[in-house]
Image (cartoon, rainbow, N blue to C red):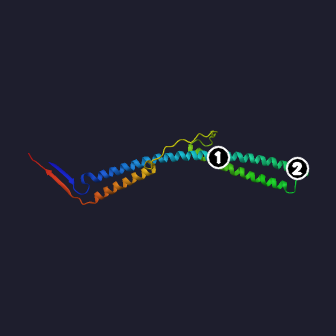
Amino acid sequence: GLSVQQNLLADFFGRADRADIRSANALYDAAMISRVSNLQDLVLNGIQTYWSAYVAQQTFQQTLAARSRYQKLTEAVRKKTKYGYANPGEVEQAEAELEGQEQNVKSASVNYLSALDNLITLLRLPAGSDVRFQVPSTIPPLPKLPSVDIEQLRPLRTSKLNLQSAEDALKSADSRTYPNLALVGQLYTQG
């Protein structure tokens, strides 16, 4: 015997199945484009973390240098007071400024260690790794960037693919909601 069946309304010639396949392909393509964007975001995040740690290190070094200068100033004011040349309250003012610099050093140290920990975590280095920052002293000229076609931007392409996927899923769902009406042909022989 031979039996042939074709849906006439619901999933006519596999229309719903093809729409499901197109929808899945569009979602896959959108995910691949999003993956490239996510990798780009990860690289930019790494660069930002590197520069944050570098700036925190430079700030910490500057606060250490400032504290050293205030320590020298405080010692000079104390010597001046010892010889009787200082104005009243000058030593206390210098010591207060030195204490302010001590607080700045502690704050900058915490910020630097936090930024360095973030960088080490991002780079998946062992804890306590020694990080040396290498920053070029010259800045290269800006590259000549070609004009960008708006239609080729990743977010727009991803949105279009998601829209296409949604439309195909809607076509599939619409096709499956039709009543089941099928043409059935059967041929049997006995010999």
Q: Residues within 10 Å of mark 1 (few under 14, many from 20)?
A: some
Image quadrant occupied by the C terminus: top left
* Residue 130 visible in this rendered orientation of the protein: no
Say which residue appears at 74% left-offset and 51% top-offset. 102
Q: Residues within 10 Å of mark 2 (few under 14, many from 20)?
A: some
In this view of the protein, can residue 111 be seen by the observer?
Answer: yes
Q: How far across and how far down the image is residue 187, in percent?
A: 13, 50
Q: Position of residue 54 (x, y in %)?
A: 64, 44
- Residue drawn at x 77%, y 46% as measured from the top left: 68
Residue 130 occupies which quadrant of the picture? top right
Decide which of tag 2 and tag 1 comes sooner along the chain: 1
**How far is mark 2 from mark 1, CA to CA?**
37 Å
Residue most extreme to the right: 84
Is 170 displayed left or right of 126 in the figure? left
- Residue 117 picture location, percent across and down: 61, 46
Q: Which residue position holds label 2? A: 80
Please state which of residues 87 and 191 is positioned toward the viewer in this rendering: 87
- Amino acid type, mark 2: Lys
Report x, y in % for residue 101. 75, 51
Apparent side of residue 63 relative to residue 47 in the rendered image (left or right): right
Element at badge 2? Answer: helix
Name the secondary structure under disc 1: helix
**Which amino acid type corresponds to the residue marked 1 in the rendered image?**
Val
Q: Is residue 136 above or below residue 14?
A: above
Residue at horizontal 24 percent and vertical 52 percent from the top:
13
Q: How many marks?
A: 2
Q: Residue at x 28, y 57 (%)?
A: 175
Identify residue for label 1: 55
Q: Are marks 2 and 1 in contact (CB under 8 Å)?
A: no
